[in-house]
Image (spheres, rainbow, N blue to C red):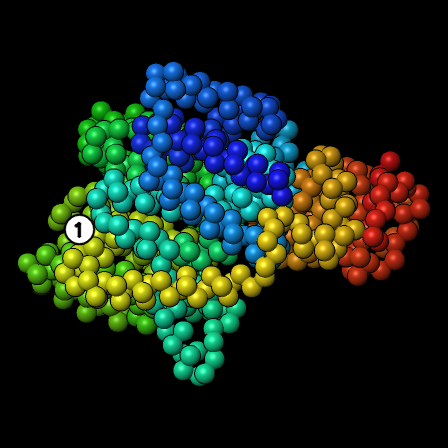
Amino acid sequence: MTDVVSGLIVLVVAMVFLSNLFEHYYISKLLSVVLLSFIIYALAHFTDFSTAFMISIIAVSAPIAYRMWKRRFRIDFEVEAVFILAFAFFLFLRSLVPDINGAEKFMDMAFLNSVLNAERFPPPDPYFAGGMLNVYYYFGHVLSAVIVKLSMLPPEYGYNVAMAFFSAASVSAVYGLARDMGVGKFAVVVLIAGVPYSVYELLSTLSTGNLPGYLFYWNSTRIFSDSTFGHAITEFPYFSFIHADLHAHVIAIPLKILFIGILYRFYRENEYALAISLMNFALFATNSWDAPAFFLLSSALLIYKDRSYWPIVALSAILILIFRLEMNANATFSFSTEFSSITEFLLFWGFFAILLYARYYGAVRNKPVYLLIAVLSPVFPPAIFFPILLYAAEKREFTDFLVMLSILTIAGCEVVVIDFRMNTYFKFYLLAWTLLIPAASEGLRVIYERRKSIAILIMALMLIYPAVATPVRHYKHEFSLDGLKFMRDSYPGDYYAVKFLYGKNAVVIEGVEGSYSYGGRIATFTGNQAVIAWPNHEVHWRDNGDELSKRISDVRAVYTSSCPVSQEIARKYGAGYIVYGAYERKLYGESNFSCMDKVFDEYGTEIYEVD
């Protein structure tokens, strides 16, 4: 416990120092981490991650030391207090249910360990021996690895610390942004709000004489029907924070808020022009779905301010292209054949509709004719926002650009599908939510100034989701940040096997099932590559079904063949170790590895070294 507390203190102190790298404290707090991670990303193509981290820390420390020498070191106690309170809150939530298990936590932990142990970038793909992580936008996991390194905690603790950090960074960034833009004190409410569906579900549940159950926290993200997957995914920030997958779309939330802050400072004072290029890279390399919108927005603002800023646009494009050329991934585009209903739409966007119309109340009163366009909403639900789109297009202030981009993004989800409709809603609704925070906060302030009681009622309804979902989601009381505690308690042999193999940079063979299973647990928590794990994800990334099927068959053969045959297959993939525990016994039965050296045997989990 002492080590954990010390690590957390070190991280908080480090963030105070990094917050002095740039002028505006709320911007610098996260932008410094982005810059540090970018330098590491560049250096790690020539050296190992740990060395790149140390060199980069020295590089960014120099200007901070200079500021201290010039007595320009300062602390924004208001922003820092918001961050520390939010950080403590989300750390507490993670301590209740710290398990790095379930949903896509295995995948995120595997990527984090792969980055931390990488000898060169791109990092190795932990679930496909011989493959690289250039099939995925992995920069967000570089950011996570930096937080883990700064905390000096083991990765199984660092995962939960990083999750709490990005959640808290979102809160403090929104607070600082709202203060900077003067859009009211309710921006944090908009960030952590739920959707109207949560109000409907709570009332429906209570009307039957029951209390909300565990799935209350989940159901608000499955409002829209989808013929392929049953439901489209419609996450929103607070759900993502408490669901706690350290995933690309979650890490991108504070980055988007930061980018808005940087663009606002540029719009107002021509500041942070070079940082715009950095943020375009960071957002593309973290969650590519967000990048086109912000590249378009930032390019438009740069040219709108002064055409002489075109080199910044060009640099943004070059940095994006560099990462894109490294990637080996493609997306498919098609026109949608399914459309949301007005009921589904309002159960998600209803609060924003109220707040946006309040924000544009003066424009609505002056030109009510625009409201006629909203009659299209029963057949095309985003049309409910089209009058707002026209009002924003006429005003063309900074917040209006965000509103226009958001509404066009929402409308686009009804027309164009990228990969799957489920993922299209998932990624772009989160983008739209973030873009709308300043305008919605202003709308809430307008209502508060005119009818305080109505504003309080609206906020109460918006906060029903966090008030109810938080306790039902955190149903355990572990009071630990050890993400491997579940394994130590339930699978102690695997736990000690992970400790034995951590960081050995060897290929391991372990049992394999589909994605979202316990398969790949050794690769996930050691930073080593499995011959194959999570094949459903790999086939989506690599589109190599035949190769995956062959590897799955070979892994089965390792556990069901004679020892010499098993050894030959292991050598084929350059495997250094074969793991044989309760999981493998369940999948394959008894195995024979008598021709190999047993190098580990604890609680029924054995590890054999391949000669």
Judge whether 180 appears above or below 352 on screen: above
The quarter of the rendered structure image containing the C terminus is top right
The quadrant of the picture occupied by the N terminus is top right
Q: Dividing the picture into quarters, in which one does residue 26 lie?
A: top left
- Asked if one can make out residue 133 in the rendered structure from this viewpoint, the answer is no
- Which residue shows up at 17% across the image and 51% down it? 392
Residue 424, how many percent across, how many down? 42, 56
| Image position, residue 63 (x, y; %) | 40, 19
Q: 10 Å neighbourhood of mark 1: few (<14), some, or many (≥20)?
A: many
Amino acid on which the number 1 mark rests in the picture: Ala
Residue pointed to by mark 1? 392
| Residue at position x 57%, y 40% in the image | 5
Q: Circle 1 sits in a helix, a strand or a loop, which is it?
A: helix
Q: Nearer the viewer, residue 254 or 609?
A: 254
Q: Is residue 48 left or right of residue 211?
A: right
Q: Nearer the viewer, residue 201 or 530?
A: 201
